[in-house]
Image (cartoon, rainbow, N blue to C red):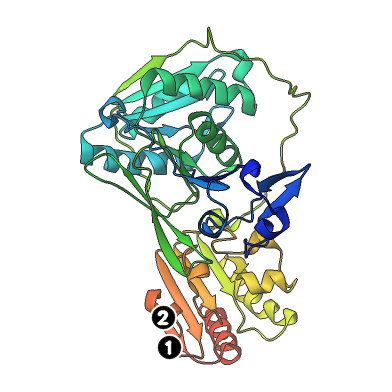
Amino acid sequence: MPKLVIDTSKITDIPSFLKLCPFGALYEKDGKVDVSAACKMCRICVKKGPEGAATFVEDEKKPEINKAEWNGVVVYVDHEDGKIHPVTLELLGKARELADKIGHKVCAVFIGSEITESAEELLHYGTDEVYVYDDPRLKRYIPELYTAVFESYIKTNKPCAILVGATTTGRELAPRIAARFKTGLTADCTILDMAENTDLIQIRPAFGGNIMAQIICPNNRPQLATVRYKVMNAPERADSAKGKIIPCSVDGIDLTTTTEIIEVLPKQKVKTIESADVIVAVGRGLKSKDDIALAKELADLIGAEIACTRPLVEAGWMDAKHQIGLSGRTVRPKLIICCGISGAVQFSAGMNNSDYIFAINSDENAPIFKIANYGLVGDVYEILPKLISKIREGK
C-alpha cells in the first residue's frame, strides 16, 4: 500500500507542521512526528511542508501471477459425519459450468474420517476428481486441522478457484484459507461467472442491496467465494459415476491443535424456512404484532412455514430465524405467498428463485410485483380472510 514517510529532522516547527493536516492525522510522540490511520493521502503535508519532511511512497507493483499454473475449479465438501450438505451439490453444478468455460477440471476436497464411501456419491454430480483426506484425527471439524489440510492440497494442486458453501463451517474455513494465501474472498455471492483469462467474476449485493458489486481478483490465486444454500441450482444426479477418487495422506501435514472436543451433543432438529416447500411471508403491511396470527392461520391451513422481512424482526415481532433476505435466510420454496411486502432488494435477493411467487400488496407499483408470478392489488386485511375462507371451503 502507498504510505507517507516522515523525516522529523527536516521539520523545524513541529506544531506548525502538524496543523498542515486537515484530518488531524499527524501527531507528535517522543519528539518525533508520525502518521495515524486518519491519513487520507491528500499529500498536503508533502506540498506545503518543508522539503523532504514528508515523502509519499508509491505502492510497490506486485509481480504478475502466472495464471496458467493454476488449474481447476474446486468445491469444498461440507458434511457432518460423512453426510454431504446439499449446498455442496449446488456448488458442484456451478463449478461444472464455470470449468467448462475455460477447459478446466472440477475437483472436490473431502476432509474427515470414514468418508471414502460417501465420496463415491460426488462422482454422480459431474466431479472429475475427489481428493479424500480420510483420517481419524479429522473426524470432527477443528479449524486449525482442516485449514492445514486444505492448505496442503492447494499448495500441491494449485486450483484456480475454490467454491465454499456459506454454512457455519464454510464461513470459518474460507477466510482462514484466504489469509494463508493472501488472496481475495467474496462472501455470499449470488452470481458467479468465469472470464476467458480464468478470472472468477463474483457478484453480490452491496450497500444494503442497493447495488450489485462485481468483484474479481485479477492478480491473486486461488480465488475464493462462498455461496449460500439454495442460491444455485443443484445438477441432476447421473445414474453412472464418472471421475475418480484420489486418496490423500495427511503425512507431513502439521495436525497439532490447541482445541480438544470433549463431547458432541446432537442438536434438536426443528423445521426451518430454508427447507420449507411452502412459505407465507409477512412484511410492514401488517399493522401490529397480533395480526401475524392471520398469516399464521393461512400457513397452518396449507402446511406452510411463516416468515417475515427484516423490519418485523427489528421491531421484535418475530424471531430472526424467520427472516428472509440478505441479512436473514435464503429460501427456495415451491410457493411463497408475500403478504404486505413491498419487495425491496434486500428481501427479494433471499427468495427470488422460488418456483412460484404470489404477492398481495395495496400498492400496484410495489417492486414485489416485478418478480411475482401472480399478484393481487388490495388490502391484505381484506384478501387474507377471503383466501382463508375459500381454502376452508375447498377442503
Horizontal arrangement in the rendering, residue 327 relative to residue 183 (left or right):
right
Reply above or below: 257 against 88. above
- Residue 303 screen position, x and y as percent: 57, 65
Reply above or below: 318 against 93. below
Nearer the observer, 88 or 194: 194
Extreme residue in the top direction: 251
Give the CA distance from mark 1 to mark 2: 7 Å
Asked if disc 1 and disc 2 are in contact, CB closer than 8 Å, the reply is: yes
Instruction: Provide the residue designation for mark 2.
Output: 369
Nearer the observer, 334 or 283: 283
Residue 133 visible within the image: yes
Nearer the observer, 26 or 93: 26
What amino acid is at disc 2? Phe
Rendered residue at 73%/23% (across/down): 259
Q: Residues within 10 Å of mark 1 (few under 14, many from 20)?
A: few
Rendered residue at 74%/24% (across/down): 261
- Residue 274 screen position, x and y as percent: 55, 55
Element type where label 2 sits in the image:
helix
- Residue 97 screen position, x and y as percent: 27, 43
What amino acid is at disc 1? Asn
Element type where label 1 sits in the image:
loop
Residue 373 visible within the image: no
Question: Which of the two marks, 1 or 2, is nearer to us in this view?
Answer: 1
Instruction: Provide the residue designation for mark 1.
Output: 365
